[in-house]
Image: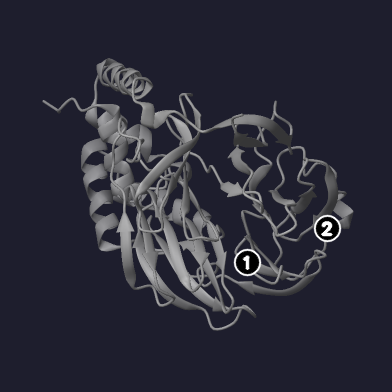
Amino acid sequence: MKPRISLSLILIVVASAGLALSATSWLPTVVRWFSHDSRPAESYQAQLREAAERRAKDPAWKPICQEVAKIQVGDPSRPGALRNYAVNRAGEILACVAPTRAGVPGVDPASVPTSSGASAGGGALRVYSPEGQLRQTWPLNIQPEAVAVAPDDTLYVGGSGKVLQLDPSGQVRRSAPTPVADAEVSLSPEVEEMVKQEARRTGRHPQDERAKLLVSLESRRADVTGLAVTERDVFVAVPAPNDFTYRVYRFTRDLTEPTLIVEKLRGCCGQMDIQSHNDELWIAHNARHTVECRDRDGQLLRKFGKSGRVRAEDFGGCCEPKNLRVLANGEILAAESGPPTCIKRFSAEGRFLEVLALNETPGDCVRVTVAPSPDGSRFYLLDTSRDAIRVFAKKD
């Protein structure tokens, strides 16, 4: 008789295995493996309700900010175009917009620059004022998934297996492929064992299961899940080509000399966010429920965080925090997709300080990019369910 295990544990098992749920069809298989009826899902919902009731009684969960505005980038009735964003020193929001079935709003396909090997259907960076007014649209020959602003306002954009360097006016200066974009796909011994186990369980031929995973790995090679820039380095987070983990490569600012510095990062739902501060690299190691600080060579300096849905200082969900920002004073903003969807502030040493913003919604396993305004008066949070960027400010 197979054990009955709650859905929350199922998700943790999948996340710990490094499976990118958005890129593979194995989640239904894992759920079926562990459960036979609706009781695990009911148990999971009961756990969420109990945790929400306990949070509501804890003053540490009282947010200091409230939502004050919303920057609508895509069509809220047909979300999927808004992928990511960053805020420059002028307070402008640089939004990554990639094609949906309707294409990129405001971009004439004929205006998208082309280059050898460019993927079909480019995207754009949209520049919004701090008040949310669209100022410019810069067509790109990639589908942008990550964007970072260097200290000198040079821009770096990643997607479609490439990293672009742009000047502050949006002109592309340089382009480089990611080290895994054309890498040969294979299965690690760990994944090969998973294939054998799944084939035995389902009765299907191992080669069929293997082919499914190879397709998933091939589809991931073009992803760029995170970018971070310092005075001398560009860090690029990408999927591994032989399993469902993630890697970080360090480039020069001219996008040369790619060097692998971190590997075997465990991420869920196609998410692995990285940030930088001074010469340090920060990683939202979401399937490990930790925030990691590493030097420019990838050596671990310190880390903090653990799993938990009740205490404000812990990270809830199967794989949190999803996204980070490091403030000028070294403090850290950590965003969780939930439940609950929230922004928390930590000291540079990892001590919990406060909940900045809170939204008690069911949550989802998605990117929730967080960023402050340059003066620190506003905080932005990505809402992929509505193709919008939500704006929070301190309560009066």
Q: Is residue 366 above or below residue 285?
A: above
Residue sitting at x 65%, y 80%: 254
> Relative to 50, does residue 109 appear above or below in the rendering?
below
Vertical position of residue 132 compared to residue 358: above or below: below
Quick check: can you spot residue 396? yes
Q: Is residue 155 above or below residue 206?
A: below
Q: Which residue is mark 1?
A: 162
Mark 2 / mark 1, whichever is N-terminal: 2
Q: Residues within 10 Å of mark 2 (few under 14, many from 20)?
A: some
Pinpoint residue 42: horizontal percent, then vertical percent: 30, 16
Amino acid carrying label 2: it is Val
Q: Quadrant of the N terminus?
A: top left
Q: Quadrant of the C terminus?
A: top right
User: Is 22 situated left or right of 118 in this image?
Assistant: left
Residue at image x 42%, y 65%? Answer: 247
Q: Secondary structure at mark 2?
A: loop
Q: Which mark is residue 112?
A: 2
Report the Cα–Cα distance between label 2 and label 1.
16 Å
Can the viewer see residue 270 in this picture? no
Q: Classify residue 62 as left or right of residue 136.
A: left
Mark 2–mark 1 contact, CB under 8 Å? no
At horizontal 70% and vertical 29% (from top left) the residue drawn is 76
Q: Position of residue 344 (x, y in %)?
A: 45, 42
